[in-house]
Amino acid sequence: YAYGEAPERVLKLAGAVESLSAHPLAFAVQSAAESVFDALPEATDFRALVGIGAEAVVEGRLCRVGKPDAEMRALIDAQTKPPEDAAPVTPFGADFCARVFEFEDRERVFADFYALEQAGKTAVLVTLDGAPVGILGISDRIRSDSRAAADALKNASVDTFMLTGDNEKTANAIGKAA
C-alpha cells in the first residue's frame, strides 16, 4: 500500500534503509527491492531500533520502517478512529506515529494494516520525515513438507506448538496454513 508516493518508491526507500540491517525481515525487504531495482539509493545515519524497526536518511529525508506503537496497534486491531487528543509515544519518537494520526486518510492506513495482518502477513509501516508513505506486507513461505510433518507428529501423539515473534494474527494464519 502506498500513500502519496508510488509503491515502487516506497519499496525502494524501505529497501535502502533495510540494506543496512541484519534482521531477517529487513533482508526480505531488501531482497524484494533489489529484485525490482538495479540499484538502491544510499542510506546514511542508520539506526537499528531493536524489536521495532530501523531508520536512516535516504535522499536527504528520514525514512523509518517498523511496527506501530501500542496506541496505533490498538486502533488497527479495533479499526476505530483515534481520539482527537491522541498523543502516541513510541520508541521512534512521537512523530513516527503521531504524523499517522494527523494524516487525512488515517483510517485507510489502519484498515490497510489490518487487512495485511488478516491475510497472514507481517505489516510494517514506512514513513518519510514522519509522514506515512506506505505499508509493506511480508509473509513467510510455508515449506511444502510442513503439513506432512505436523500430521506425522500428531499421529505419533506428540504435542506441538509454535513459538514466534510475529503478531498473533500472522501466527494464526501461518499455523493454519501449516
Image (spheres, rainbow, N blue to C red):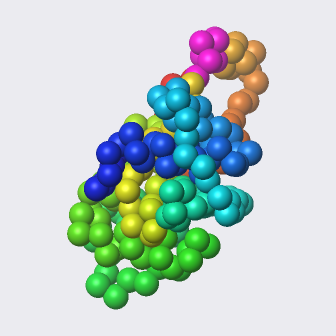
Image check: 48 left or right of 100?
right
* Residue under the point 43% across and 84% down: 87
Q: Is residue 89 magenta?
A: no
* Residue under the point 56% across and 77% down: 93
Q: Nearer the viewer, residue 93 or 165?
A: 93
Image check: 7 left or right of 52?
left
Residue sitting at the far bottom: 85
Residue 29 appears in the figure = no
* Residue under the point 64% across and 12% down: 145
Q: Nearer the viewer, residue 171 or 55?
A: 55
Image check: 135 left or right of 19?
left
**Is residue 176 depicted above or below 84 in this figure?**
above
- On the image, the x and y values in percent for residue 72 come to 43, 68
Q: Nearer the viewer, residue 166 or 61?
A: 61
Residue 27 appears in the figure = yes
**Is residue 146 depicted above or below 118 in this figure?**
above
- On the image, the x and y values in percent for residue 132 come to 39, 62
Image check: 113 left or right of 68?
left
Q: Nearer the viewer, residue 109 or 77?
A: 109
Q: Is residue 145 magenta?
A: yes
Residue sitting at the far left: 104
How many numbered tags mark residues here? 0
**Is residue 49 depicted above or below 162 in this figure?**
below
Please report the bounds of the magenta region as a residue range: 142-148
* Residue under the point 49% across and 31% down: 37
* Image quadrant containing the C terminus: top right
